[in-house]
Image (tube, coloured by chain):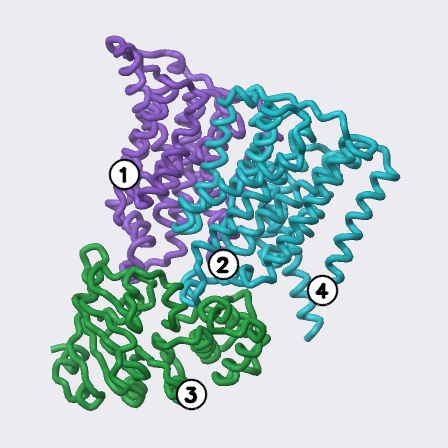
Chain colours: A green, B cyan, C purple
């Protein structure tokens, strides 16, 4: 279980004079659950934007399952098996919940889908996520928690090898957090590696096998949840001097 | 609309058109119907990029006029009896390439830049035509219509049936696109481009396809125009009115569904004919502008959206 | 061989014309550059300003520039009213991209058609003692109908620039686009500020319109030619930078005059649009834009 599915080496990203990421290394093993934490503005979202292809890193390289994807556009990465959910849900508002899932099934996972069974496959995903009852509702009218589930369902419908979950639980109640956590764990049991970005420490620590900490664009710590909790650098990054 | 009902109504429209040419002799009606149908093709074409994909084209008149000038140039080069279908195909090719090129230059940028570039494109081509003496330059060109009009009573009747066929064809293409995998990709782009890209949709490629189809269809609408009016100058071919109609009709009908621009074009087009005859052509122009502004401010989903809302309320 | 005096005259005439273009574009630099509102109807308002100057000039013999200044407050309130509609119908619901664009397109069209219905498609002009006069410096002629607009435009541009950079409200307008946080710290309501800024932008069209009709006769559809010019200038100038906009305006003015002099005036409309297309394709951040 130590074959890396994703290897990012020496990632640097600048916005004008501002250095958002500086020489960050990150790897994810196949089937691993990785937590990515750090204070606001530490570069977490920039890093996953570089991984998913929404932004291109200025320096460094990214390999996915042995292929160099550093300059590959986002849609091709999605086809290879990199999926992400968005912190602020971005449903396709003119479509029903079911149609929302047809998009990744017909594009990202097209080569791995049974073209005649797209609707069934979408329903299967909705069943796993617990949105089956809302399949034909308009996606714009969903509640917060269902919107988050739809984000995950859409990522799942892309049939990923690696899922990047960007703060899927922010603003949810404790019971709802557990619900999302359960979905991610179930997904992981089927062999999908997960990078979880989260502010809710309870969830990250329970979920992750390994945790990486970013601060001011640099990786300051890496280890098991227990090690991270005891790391004085991490405490300083969060609490200040 | 289910498949069979759709194709039946297409055939019915064609048969109705042919019957009209059989029973009505007054050319005025065919003139009016031609204008309405031409507007329908333009509206359907605009909607493929504007409604399905979410990119606003202000330069519809440019595509339309280039289509018309393609016919004029071919007519000058090969004589007035050069077959019209080939002219239409040539116009589709030229205008499709313009759509592709313009898209390639600007569709990577924010949507507004594409919109402004379309305005720019129309003026650049208008300037070119003003300076191109071969097709008449600023003074315009007279077009002799061919003597032959097949088995129809007059040339305008033939043009009307031709435009009817083109209209039905463009509606069929638009409908097929709307329900297809490609159409879902376009809708995803319109709803959220970043999310679409992350769901594996090759957004740039799809936008280029969409812009190309739109351009080609508008070229098709413009290609028979010289034979309809028999005199074309840049000022009339690049008329802003063409561009406004192409936007107003889908916006009034509703942009998300393929039938929206058809409803909008038939309603607005017919109203325009009535107003032009009964009141004045200036008022007709003002009417479209005001309808456009009123609809997009008060009913952004158009007539189709209003009907859907009404149905949803009754279902509850 | 190019004659030197023709060349020198073209440069000077181009600079004067470019200065006037700055007056047409400055409002758009605020709405499009700063507020992110794609007001395609901007040049139509300029033409409306020209007609206001025409009416008051022919009725009461007032000086066109004075009329422009008098009409500016009225245009300001018209601008505020339009922004209210725009905000309520599009910005608040997040539909400004597609419907908002079409809204301004429709507005432009309505202004044009109303002018045609009221005054026809004939060219209209104003009279003032300085129109028709000129001063000659060497072989370069400086007609007052170009000099006066240049001077007024320069004053307008400088005034707006100072206003935006020196006053509280001006800085708030800049912050609306660039720095939401600073705006919150200033305790300002972004909607109110945008509304004011939009009013200000429309107010400048009253003045620009009076200059337009000093330069030459005006007809209702003249505004269309200025769509490309104004957008080309704002994009080339780096979206919202006033000095960048002014330099771009001068540049476009000179290039257009050169083309008109050496290739013929029928080619000049394509200049700004060509520049615009090239800028968008090659360097969308403009000549002076932040990347």
Q: CA distance from mark 2 to mark 1?
A: 33 Å
Query: What mark, if any, has residue B2 been given in the picture?
Result: 4
Q: Quadrant of the N terminus of chain C?
A: top left
Q: Name the spot of residue A127 as percent of width and height, x first.
A: 52, 84
For this view, does B189 lie left or right of residue B293?
A: left
Which label sits in the foreground, 3 or 1? 3
Q: Mark 4 and mark 3 in contact (Cβ < 8 Å)?
A: no
Q: Looking at the image, which residue is at 55% across and 80% down? A: A123
* Residue to which mark 3 is pinned: A179
Element class at badge 4: loop
Q: CA distance from mark 1 to mark 4?
A: 56 Å
Element class at badge 2: helix
Look at the picture and state if C146 lies above or below C193.
above
Q: Residues within 10 Å of mark 2 (few under 14, many from 20)?
A: many
Q: Name the spot of residue B90 as percent of width and height, x first.
A: 58, 37
Chain to which the residue tagged by mark 4 belongs = B
Look at the picture and state if B261 lies above or below C234.
below
Query: What mark, if any, has residue B190 been given in the picture?
Result: 2
Q: Residues within 10 Å of mark 4 (few under 14, many from 20)?
A: few
Chain to which the residue tagged by mark 2 belongs = B
Q: Residues within 10 Å of mark 3 (few under 14, many from 20)?
A: some
Q: Name the spot of residue B54 as percent of width and height, x first.
A: 51, 54
For this view, does B166 lie left or right of residue A241?
A: right
Chain to which the residue tagged by mark 3 belongs = A
């Amino acid at each position: 279980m130590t074959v890396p599915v994703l290897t990012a080496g020496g990632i640097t990203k600048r916005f004008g004079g501002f250095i958002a990421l500086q020489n960050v290394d990150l790897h994810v093993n196949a089937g691993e659950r990785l937590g990515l934490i750090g204070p606001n503005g530490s570069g977490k979202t920039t890093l996953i934007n570089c991984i998913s292809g929404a932004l291109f890193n200025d320096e460094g390289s990214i390999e996915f399952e042995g292929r160099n994807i550093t300059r590959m556009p986002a849609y091709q990465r999605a086809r290879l098996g990199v999926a992400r959910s968005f912190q602020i849900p971005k449903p396709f508002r003119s479509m029903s919940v079911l149609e929302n899932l047809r998009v990744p099934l017909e594009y990202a996972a097209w080569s791995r889908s049974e073209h005649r069974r797209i609707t069934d496959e979408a329903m299967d995903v909705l069943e796993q996520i617990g949105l089956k009852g809302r399949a034909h509702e308009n996606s714009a009218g969903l509640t917060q928690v269902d919107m988050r589930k739809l984000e995950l369902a859409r990522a799942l419908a892309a049939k990923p090898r690696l899922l990047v979950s960007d703060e899927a639980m922010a603003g949810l109640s404790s019971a709802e957090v557990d619900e999302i956590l359960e979905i991610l764990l179930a997904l992981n049991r089927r062999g999908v590696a997960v990078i979880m970005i989260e502010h809710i420490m309870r969830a990250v620590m329970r979920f992750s096998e390994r945790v990486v900490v970013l601060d001011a664009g640099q990786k300051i710590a890496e280890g098991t949840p227990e090690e991270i909790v005891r790391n004085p650098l991490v405490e300083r990054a969060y609490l200040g001097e | 609309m289910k498949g069979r009902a759709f194709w039946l109504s297409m055939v019915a429209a064609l048969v109705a058109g042919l019957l009209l040419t059989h029973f009505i002799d007054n050319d005025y009606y065919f003139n009016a119907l031609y204008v309405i149908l031409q507007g329908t093709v333009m509206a359907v074409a605009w909607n493929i990029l504007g409604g399905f994909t979410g990119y606003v084209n202000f330069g519809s008149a440019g595509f339309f006029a280039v289509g018309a000038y393609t016919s004029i140039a071919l007519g000058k080069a090969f004589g007035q009896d050069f077959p019209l279908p080939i002219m239409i195909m040539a116009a589709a090719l030229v205008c499709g390439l313009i759509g592709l090129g313009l898209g390639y230059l600007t569709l990577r940028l924010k949507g507004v830049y594409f919109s402004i570039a379309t305005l720019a494109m129309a003026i650049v081509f208008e300037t070119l035509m003003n300076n191109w003496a071969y097709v008449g330059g600023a003074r315009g060109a007279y077009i002799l219509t061919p003597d032959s009009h097949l088995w129809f009573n007059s040339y305008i009747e033939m043009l009307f049936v031709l435009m009817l066929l083109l209209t039905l064809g463009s509606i069929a293409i638009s409908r097929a696109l709307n329900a297809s995998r490609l159409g879902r990709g376009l809708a995803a782009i319109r709803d959220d481009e970043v999310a679409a890209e992350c769901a594996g949709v090759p957004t740039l490629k799809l936008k280029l396809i969409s812009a190309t189809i739109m351009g080609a269809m508008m070229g098709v609408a413009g290609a028979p125009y010289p034979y309809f009016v028999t005199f074309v100058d840049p000022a009339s071919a690049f008329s802003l009115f063409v561009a406004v109609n192409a936007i107003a009709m889908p916006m009034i009908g509703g942009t998300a569904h393929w039938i929206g621009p058809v409803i909008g074009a038939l309603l607005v087009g017919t109203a325009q004919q009535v107003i032009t005859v009964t009141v004045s052509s200036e008022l007709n122009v003002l009417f479209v502008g005001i309808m456009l502004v009123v609809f997009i401010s008060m009913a952004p989903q158009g007539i189709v959206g209003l009907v859907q809302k009404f149905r949803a309320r009754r279902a509850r | 061989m190019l004659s030197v005096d023709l060349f020198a005259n073209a440069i000077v005439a181009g600079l004067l014309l470019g200065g006037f273009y700055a007056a047409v574009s400055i409002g758009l630099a605020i709405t499009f550059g700063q507020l992110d509102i794609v007001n395609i109807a901007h040049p139509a308002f300029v033409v409306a300003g020209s007609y206001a100057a025409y009416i008051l000039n022919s009725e009461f013999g007032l000086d066109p520039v004075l009329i422009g200044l008098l009409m500016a407050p009225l245009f300001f309130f018209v601008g505020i009213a339009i922004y209210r509609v725009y905000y309520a119908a599009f910005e608040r619901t997040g539909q400004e991209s597609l419907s908002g664009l079409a809204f301004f397109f429709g507005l432009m069209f309505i202004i044009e058609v109303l002018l045609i219905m009221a005054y026809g498609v004939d060219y209209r002009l104003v009279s003032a003692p300085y129109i028709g006069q000129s001063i000659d410096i060497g072989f370069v002629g400086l007609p007052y109908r170009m000099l006066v607009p240049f001077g007024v435009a320069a004053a307008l541009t400088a005034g707006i620039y100072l206003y935006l950079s020196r006053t509280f409200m001006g800085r708030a307008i800049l912050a609306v686009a660039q720095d939401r946080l600073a705006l919150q710290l200033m305790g300002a309501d972004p909607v109110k500020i945008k509304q004011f800024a939009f009013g200000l932008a429309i107010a400048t069209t009253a003045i620009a319109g009076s200059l337009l009709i000093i330069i030459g006769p005006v007809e209702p559809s003249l505004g269309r030619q200025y769509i490309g010019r104004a957008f080309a200038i704002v994009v080339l100038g780096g979206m919202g930078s006033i000095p960048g906009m002014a330099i771009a305006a001068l540049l476009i003015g000179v290039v257009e005059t050169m083309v008109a002099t050496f290739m013929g005036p029928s080619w000049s409309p394509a200049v700004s649009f060509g520049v615009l297309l090239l800028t968008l394709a090659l360097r969308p951040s403009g000549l002076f834009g932040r990347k």
